[in-house]
Every structure is written in C-alpha cells, then in structure tokens.
Image (tube, coloured by chain):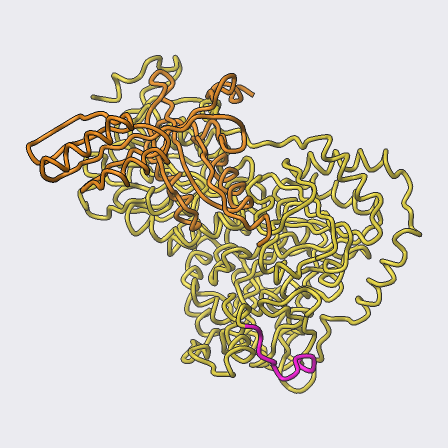
Chain colours: A yellow, B orange
Amino acid sequence: MTAQQTIAQPPADTRSMTGAQVVLQALLDQGVEVIFGYPGGAVLPLYDALFQQKTIHHVLVRHEQAAVHAAEGYARSTGKVGVVLVTSGPGATNTVTGLTDALMDSVPVVCLTGQVPTHMIGNDAFQEADTVGITRPCTKHNYLVKKPEDLARIVHEAFHVASSGRPGPVVVDLPKNILMGEAPYAEKEAGRRRTYNPRREPDPARIEEAVRLLARAERPIFYVGGGVINSGPLACALLTELVRATGYPITLTLMGLGAFPAGDPQYLGMLGMHGTYEANMAMHDCDVMVCIGARFDDRVTGRLDGFSPGSRKIHVDIDPSSINKNVPVDIAIVGDAERSLEAMLEAWKRVAPTVDRARIAPWWDQIERWRAVDSLRFRQSGTAIKPQYAIKRLYELTRDREPFITTDVGQHQMWAAQHFRFEKPRRWLTSGGLGTMGYGFPAALGVQMAHPDALVINISGDASWVMNMQEMSTAMQHRLPVKVFLVNNGYMGMVRQWQDFFHGSRRAESYMDSMPDFVKLAEAFGAVGLRATTPAELDEVIERMLATDGLVLADIVVEEVENVYPMIPGGAAHNEIKLSPEDDGGHEPISEDGMVLV
Amino acid sequence: MNIEDEEKRHTIVVLVDNEAGVLARVIGLFSGRGYNIDSLTVAEVDPVRRLSRINIVTTGTELVIEQIKALLSKLVPVHRVQDLTIEGPHVERELALVKVNGDRERLIQALRIADFMHARLVDSTPGSLVFEVTGSSDELDAFISLVEPVEVSRAGVVAIGRGEMILDGTAQDDG
C-alpha cells in the first residue's frame, strides 16, 4: 500500500509531502521555534527537511539526555512546549532520564525519536530499541506512528497532551519509512481527542466550602507548589492577590519558588526536609492547610503520621490522582490553579470582605517567634568560603538583573533554594522530583536559547556538573553566555552529609578524587574559567563572571564538609527539625523506619 | 486495623480505544506501582467505534483503589472507568475449562458433579473429560474443588451493571 492511496481528500493547496515535511509543518503550526537534538540514521529525512528551512532553530547537543534537559529549561522558563529530536536506539534510550525528570516535575516536552522502518521493527535491526515500550512508564503518553495518515494527527495530539492538564513529556516514535514516504497533512484541530479532557473548571460548591473553612481558620497556611507556576503568570498573580487578601502565611515547595514574591512579609520560605523552621512548624501546627498545585511529596511531609496532625486540609490540583495519594484531605478540588484561584478569590471577597486581623494575630505572633530563630543562619568565618555565603553573595550581586537560576542536585541545590530569593515565577529551574544530577547545565542552555539577553546562571556542584559537562561544547557552538557557578567542595556533598549523619561517617565513594582543573577545562572549550578560593576573592570573581561576555565557568572552592541545615531527617516529623550541628545531639541514630527512606 | 487500611476486592471496568499498547498501559500502571491484579479480561465490544472493554478485579485499601481509578482515568485512550463494586448492583460471570483425568469410575463421578452444578461437557477421550463451567467466581471455585481436575483454564471475570446503569463511550466524551 502506498501513502498516495490513503489520502482521501488532500487539501487543495497542499502539494504532496513526505512524512518528514509533514512533521516539520506540524511543528511550525504548533509555533515551534527551537529544537534540541542529535542526528542519526533513522532521523536523517527529518534533518534533511530541517536543513531546508529557516524558521526552526536546531540546537545540536552533545548527549541526548542533555537535549531533554535543555528542552525542559526552555519549557519551564517560557511556558511553551520544549521539543527534542533524536535518532533511534541509543538516541532514544539516552533520553529516558530526561523524560522521567520531565514526568516527575510536570514539564511539557515533545520528544521525536527515530525508529527503524516498520517492516524491520522487532527484527533486532541496527539501532533498534523498543522505544514506546521503554518510555511508556516515563512519559505522559507515547506513540509509534505506523501509518502515514496518522502522522500529522499524532504530532498535533502529542503537543496537546504534553501541554494540557498536568503537563508532561510525550514521545512520538517515527519509523524511517514513514518519514520518507508520502503522507497527508492534517491541521492542528486533528490533534483533539475525545477521550482526553482534563478538567479545568473547579466545582463551585467545593470552592465555597473551602473558602468558608478558610475564613474561619485561626492558624491557616497556604502550601503552594509548581502547579501554580505551570498554570501561568495569571495564576501566580491571583495567588498573590488571594494570599494578601487573607493576610495568611504562605510557604512554597522547591518547585513552587517564585510563585509568590519572596520579599513579601507573609512568605515563610520553602518548606520540607531543608525548609525553614517557621514554614515547617507552621505546617505542623496549622488548623487549616490550603495546598495548591503541590503533591504532598515525602520531602515535604516527612513522617506521614506526624504530618500536620491537627489540620483540616484543602487540596487544589489539576491531577485527580495527586489527591488523597499520600495524605487524605478534607476538601478536594480538581481543577486548573488559575481557574480555582480566580473562583476562590471571588468567593473570599464575598465571604470575608475584610481581613479579621485579630483572629489570626496570635498565629502570626507564634510564627514571628519561629522566624526569630533565623534557621538559615550561618557564619562566614575563617579562610574558606562557606557555600551558603557564596550563594548569598551571588544573589546579592545579581538580584537587580532578575537572573534565571538552574541548579543540579545536592547540597548546592538546597543552599540555592534557601538563599536565592525569587520575586517572579519561571526564574528558578531545578530537578525536584527525580533529583537528576547533570540537569542544571543543559537546562540553562535551554533557558538561554529562549531568553538570549537574560542573565542565566547554573549553580552547580562539582559532582553534578561533570555529569553533563560535555555541553560546554554546545554552549560554545551556539554562543550561549551561561554563567556556571560551581560550588566546589570536592565531595558529593549531600551523600557525604548522609554518610556522616547516618552511616558512622564512613564516606564510601563520596570523595571526588582526580577532578579536572575547572579553569583549564573551561579554557580547553574556549570558554572563560575563573576561580575563587578565599572569601576575599569571591565578590571579584562574581563581578568578573558577570562582566564577561560568553560562557564562564567560575570554580568557587568552598569549605569541604559544610552541612545543610535545617534538616528534617528521614522518618521524622516537621516539629523534629534539626537546626544546627549543636542541635544534633551528636547525630543520634534515626529510627529504622527512617533509615530505609532515601 | 484502621477501617481505611482494610483491603477490599473491587471489580473495575474500563472502556478504551482499541489501539496498540493500550493493554500494556493499563497493566504497567498496576505493575509499576505494585498494585494487585486478581483477574483481567479484554475484548473489543464496539467494532464500529473500535472500543475495547477491560474488566479488572483488584484488591486494595480505599486509598489505593481511589488511586487506581484516578490513574486509569488519566490514560489518554481511556473513555470511562466504572467501579462496579461501588457504583451499584451488577452481575459478574466467569468461564473455565476444567480437565479431569482418571479411570471410568472417576470420570462418571465427575459427570455427576457436572450435572448438578450445570457444567457442560465439551470434550472427552477414553481417559479424560473437559468441562465448560460458567458462573460466579465462587461457583467456579466450588466446582473445581469438587472434581479435582488435572488442569484448569479460567477466562477471568466479566462484569456488567444491572438495569439503567450503562457504560457508554460517547456519554461524557462530547464535552
């Protein structure tokens, strides 16, 4: 059967197209401007089509994992869908970590993978892998295109599925013969599917119930996550308006930083394992909790039976399967954050037109006492740079430029989350759910592609950064002036911290021996390398980094064995938070239940 | 034991687009999260609209069952999810083929049991009989334990709501 025979009604103005041209046209109709990818045998027809046009810019990465992280960076900093193009076999399998990362953190990504021709599928052909089988559990949905007439519809549908509801990654597997043969085109509308209709509108009765409960609260708290950022800037503005209208305190998750301005006095800082004392204590002692766009992750809740034991809980989420998953709630509202916040704000103005300060005054008094503990304090003393100090100075010297910050995973990530303060959404990109070391640098490249004139900083650690350092080459080729701020302590710091706390200080394999000279490494790629080893040098290195055009790798050599505080050890509750080494009681052993947690 | 921690058997039916990989998505959802599948049946039920119906019998706490249904509903090719155990009166039937081997006396004994339990003889050789038995899972269990078979093949539970309760792909999809 040829593709020609299957075209029932070719559009009058469409000349016959190859599958590759159909994919490209669909991408153009979806408004795609940038693709992150890596060519190979199975996708050559698509690369050939890309070569012959000027609208879509292709960024050649050095490893397919980085292509997905770059697309995530692009997507999270813009709200648009990030697009990846890789070849079959190893090209596809290398995307798995990035896809899982995007799934866990709800990032809209469409990943186009090449595949061997349909007649060779299942034959163990060269560079064949069961891509839809491998990626089924790590995507929101995936497709193998077997018929030319399905091609355009599937590509459009992939964008619709990736970007609507709770966003996520979608894989479209494209056999080479489908790309080379003729295929009919279909417009964007073809990508709507009757079975897939995520609910956006909240139930008004539930909203009313929630707001009435909220208006009576004596110890309320807003607990807000990345879902509000995903919903869009309007959702964040509505959140800010609602929180200010109520006069209630708010805490944000790691993924939610920036959803509410950090400079606002009602903001208690981040909650969770390394969150502030006031945020965690307020979560524990509250009587009404409003969770919006967060998912009661184990890093947030601590020990479940000790999690906010006395509160009534309201949960707003677009994903029904996130509700009652870890923590049973009293009022469940399924809907988009923007629509839900709009409805809650409208109801609030009706139910509680004036803020009853007296009702919540004792609560705020209590919170201020917790806040006075100053749980993020640290002392910069001695000749070594404290990592917290390095990040704090970076923040103070760049805050006026509203930089985009990406991080990798570990201690530097937590210190960045604690000491960098975000006034706006989409400025903070970190791998929260999967905890992917190597995420930050390629993500920063994706951010910089979307915002060529912005200051984009990758705060990283030495162990994380070398996991995707090959992307220096990508940054150089595409002239992406990302600033890498390497918090270099010579260890996998968080692993070392856990070994010191929970495994008798036996530092098995957590020392990063034989690391490169990062300044020379930067220079080898044609970038600028800088180094600071004493507190006195720090500011000057930051200033020089900011003043340098192009890619900079700033090696900030810090105190080797600093620990992240506060910390809620695994298996502990919010009110069992450890504030400092003195508070540790010499690392008392944690419970057996706690030890098995990661 | 907390009432919420009590595990209960649920019969869940799922109406899906009959497309490649849909069953793998459903099964992967269970295996990936360690949920039980006690029984599973799949067949196309609407050839015009290419709809398949999946009947799943699973066991779990109230929270787990709620989670399973929410996750099933999220799958892109899924039209409807119905928990018959909760949503109302329904009938459940299962089919089994049951093979009994032995001497003449043993086979005659099996035929007598089959007769009063309404199992149908579908094959016989000089030393063996194969019965077809349909009924509730309990009825099948009872028959199987009585005839002491050498081999059993069970189809798994199929279920349908009684009366006005109709699971139809179009009903809520047009929105």
Q: Where is residue A142? Give x, y as percent.
A: 39, 38
Residue B139: image quadrant is: top left
Q: Nearer the viewer, residue A352 or B119?
A: B119
Residue A211 horizontal side relative to residue B7, left or right: right
* Relative to A4, residue A284 above or below: below
Q: Please name the residue shown 71% across and 76% down the image.
A: A378
Q: Nearer the viewer, residue A258 or A488?
A: A258
Q: Nearer the viewer, residue A212 or B142?
A: B142
* Relative to A594, residue B9 above or below: above
Magenta stretch in the rendered image = A581-591
Residue A390 horizontal side relative to residue A19, left or right: right
Q: Residue furthest right?
A: A358
Q: Where is residue B17? Give x, y as percent.
A: 39, 26
Q: Please name the residue shown 6% across and 32% down the image.
A: B126
Q: Where is residue A236? Give x, y as percent.
A: 70, 44
Does the magenta-highlighted stretch encompass residue B170? Answer: no
- Residue B171 visible in the shown view: yes
Q: Residue furthest left?
A: B126
Does the magenta-highlighted stretch encompass residue A587? Answer: yes
Q: Where is residue A89? Give x, y as percent.
A: 28, 48
Q: Which quadrant is home to the N terminus of chain A?
A: top left
* Relative to A89, residue A466 above or below: below
